[in-house]
Amino acid sequence: MSSEVLGISTSPRVKGNSDLLLREALAGAESAGAQVEYVRLAGLNIGACVECNTCYETGTCRIEDDYQQILEKLLNIDRLIFATPVFFMSVCAQAKVLIDRGQCLWAHKYVLKQQLFEIECDRRAMVIAVGGSKSKKQFDSVQLTMKSYFDSLQMSYVANLFVSKIDARGAIEKHPSAMKEAFRLGEQLVSDETEVPDKPVNVELF
Ligand SMILES: Cc1cc2nc3c(=O)[nH]c(=O)nc-3n(C[C@H](O)[C@H](O)[C@H](O)COP(=O)(O)O)c2cc1C
């Protein structure tokens, strides 16, 4: 077991529901022997993509802010856990700003036709998302966005933990199984025995 796991918490709310699940998933990964790192986006200075298209020529983003340190981490890990609240049926704004800055990764792959890594790497990612409503469609857009982002990061999208009907801050701690599932999925993410599935394994809780 030598996985390095990065957990990105994108909720603007301190100790929000998705954040608490992320911490639990990281604890699961750590218990299985992985090295884990937690990053909270809300405290960082990451500006939106300005569509200058510089990256179409260079493969890198010319905006100098905290994105560069996150990108470096993203390129040096083999497991990612991305946590977001559902806002208007999609990822929250903080998450989307980070994802859009990934256009330099997309340009690297699809415009410049270059690989991010010289050798093939076993990089895997999972998503944690929490929504207040009971709508079954609230995670559709999250999944599509994350699929595209993980593709640019050259990561296999292996699992989702989606929890509905959780609204008040910290309410997730009273959910009968969500915290346990987060821990288990964190463990599983770093297990050497888990094969990459054809499509992400969905754990949907209400
Ligand atoms: C701006 C905003 C938009 C929201 N939009 C949705 C939504 O479209 N669907 C939903 O189920 N919940 C929505 N919610 C509720 C949050 O998803 C819910 O409170 C969740 O538990 C927040 O997670 P967090 O504590 O990790 O931030 C919204 C909340 C806010 C503040």
Image (tube, grey):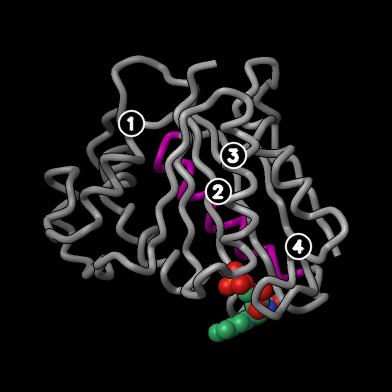
Quadrant holding ligand 1?
A: bottom right
- Label 1 vs 2, first from the N-terminus: 1
**Amino acid type of the residue tagged 4 in the rendering:** Val
Q: CA distance from mark 4 to mark 1?
A: 29 Å
Q: CA distance from mark 3 to mark 1?
A: 17 Å
Asked which quadrant contains residue 166, the reply is bottom right
- Decide which of 85, 144 is in the foreground and name it: 85
**According to the image, label 1 marks what residue?**
76
Q: CA distance from mark 2 to mark 4?
A: 18 Å
Q: Provide residue 37's location: percent of width, then percent of height.
A: 43, 41
Q: CA distance from mark 1 to mark 2?
A: 20 Å
Residue occupying image coordinates x 57% and y 32%: 30
Say above or below: 142 vs 117: below
- Which mark is in front, 3 or 1? 1
**According to the image, label 3 marks what residue?**
157
**According to the image, label 2 marks what residue?**
147
**Amino acid type of the residue tagged 3 in the rendering:** Tyr
Start-end of magenta stretch: 137-154
Q: CA distance from mark 3 to mark 4?
A: 18 Å
Q: Residues within 10 Å of mark 4 (few under 14, many from 20)?
A: many
**Amino acid type of the residue tagged 2 in the rendering:** Lys
Asked which quadrant contains residue 78, the reply is top left
* For residue 170, side relative to residue 95 (left or right): right
Labelled pair 3, 2 in contact (Cβ < 8 Å): yes
* For residue 38, side relative to residue 197 (left or right): left
**Amino acid type of the residue tagged 1 in the rendering:** Asn
